[in-house]
Amino acid sequence: MSNPNAETEQQAQPIVWDPTFAFDDANLVIRSADGIHFKVHKLMMRMISDVFKDMTALDQVNKGLRVDCQDEGDLVHVQITENSSTINFVLRLAYHLPLPRPTSCTLYELSEILDMLDKYQMQRLNDSVQDFILLNMNLEANPLWYYIRAKAYNLTRIKEAALPPCLRFGSLGPRNESRNEGPCSRGSTLIPRLSQTTLFHETKG
């Protein structure tokens, strides 16, 4: 039997803010799956995301989520399913803030970031995330991983950069050191193999 006071107790819990995104002039609060709150600007979210643009225009945010903001005024709150580290990275791209060290971003975490950009239609950030990948990630360590995601998410520069090492490695699967990074994307536990013929045609396309 559900506790009728559960929602009230949850709302009464202290709010945990992401220290980087707690702007004084914010008018939108995003709550992550792990309970971290991001105080951001509706205008920024509308600029980078067609989904947030529609949500704020139609006022379709999660009205069921109301936390005690004390002196924060009547801020609009929206609950999303992504974790706080993924949201933090994406917001850093949007606000042009320094990104985490490359060694702190695993392939699994990068998958989550790319999934979020795709889910919320944040194509305006594609160039920024490609810049990060090209400057900081070792594509040759697992070129098929990057190539497949580049095709799926229309990341043209990543696709072009990952194709040559795919050809050099003879279209082999991911190397052993990358297999423990976690699932490559939601609902997927393995990377499909690409034939040499498929890769050859990509060079002709």
Image (tube, rainbow, N blue to C red):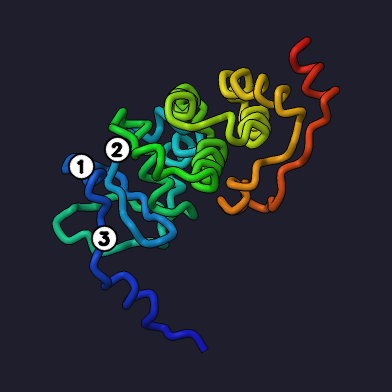
Residue at image mark 1: 23
Which secondary structure lies at badge 1? loop
Q: Position of residue 196 (x, y in %)?
A: 82, 25
Residue at image mark 2: 41
Relative to residue 203, is residue 191 depicted above or below?
Answer: below
Point out the residue furthest to the left here.
Answer: 71
Q: Work out whether residue 12 or residue 155 is closer to the camera in this orientation and state it.
A: 155
Asked whether the residues under the numbered discs 2 and 1 touch, taking CB atoms below 8 Å apart as contact, a structural biologist would say yes
Q: Residues within 10 Å of mark 3 (few under 14, many from 20)?
A: few
Give the amino acid type for the residue marked by disc 3 in the picture: Val
Image quadrant in which you'd find residue 192:
top right
Give the amino acid type for the residue marked by disc 1 in the picture: Phe
Q: Work out whether residue 24 or residue 189 is closer to the camera in this orientation and state it.
A: 189
CA gap, disc 3 and disc 1: 14 Å
Which secondary structure lies at badge 3? strand
- Which residue is painted at 33% across and 62% down in the image? 66
Relative to residue 95, is residue 157 depicted above or below?
Answer: above
Image quadrant in which you'd find residue 48:
top left
Residue at image mark 3: 16
Which secondary structure lies at badge 2? loop
Give the amino acid type for the residue marked by disc 2 in the picture: His
CA gap, disc 2 and disc 1: 8 Å
CA gap, disc 3 and disc 2: 18 Å
Q: Work out whether residue 176 or residue 108 is closer to the camera in this orientation and state it.
A: 176
Q: Residues within 10 Å of mark 2 (few under 14, many from 20)?
A: some
